[in-house]
Amino acid sequence: MTSLQILVGTTSGNTEYLADHAAELIKQQLQIEVELHYEPDLSELDQSQPWLVFIASHGAGDYADSMLDFYDQIQQITELKSFPYAIVAIGESCYDTYCAAGRDLDKRLAQLGAHRLCQGLEIDMLEDDPEHAVEQWLPNWIEALRSYTQK
């Protein structure tokens, strides 16, 4: 493992800030190159490296604006390589579509053959401190990533 692909689905910029924060924390703990994709394009993503996806849900559970093209791309394919991934879904629990985009993407990546590295994280922007939530979740993700890469 030489790099980490961080995909960012944001509309307002909050998710981008959170992904940047996580990238800095990861670089402090792992000797790994981090590639941030603020408008992910499937053709530019390395499927031999792990993915960490930060995605906000908007409207009726829609994908954030910066990930709409990526959404279309993964609907048009039938398989991906079996790379490890994890999802950080951001939403507001007052909506019945809370974190729907993240849940949908998690399901779709698994259907396409990617390997869910660990239980994802769902962040409620109404209740949670997003940075704290990521800081608490990352050690488990890092441990799962280390275990996966040592296989």
Image: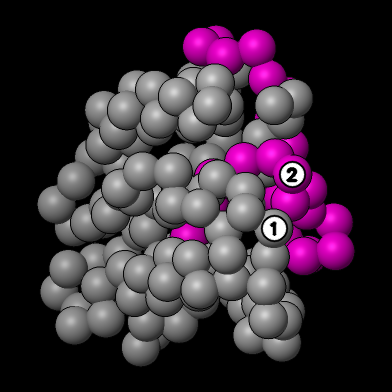
Location of mark 1 (residue): 81
| Residue 83 highlighted magenta (yes or no) | no
Check whether the beta carbons of the residues at disc 1 and disc 2 lie within 8 A of each other.
yes
Q: Which amino acid type is shown beneath numbered disc 1?
A: Lys
Residues 150 and 133: in front is: 150
Location of mark 2 (residue): 48
Image position, residue 57 (x, y; %)? 40, 72
User: What residue is rendered at 70% in x and 40% in y?
Assistant: 49
User: What residue is rendered at 78% in x and 48% in y?
Assistant: 46
| Residue 33 highlighted magenta (yes or no) | yes
Image position, residue 81 (x, y; %)? 69, 58
Q: Which amino acid type is shown beneath numbered disc 2?
A: Ser
Residues 102 and 83: in front is: 83
Image position, residue 42 (x, y; %)? 77, 65
Q: Considering only vertical position in the picture, is 87 above or below 10?
A: above
Q: Is residue 81 left or right of residue 61?
A: right
Q: Which residues are magenta?
A: 28-55
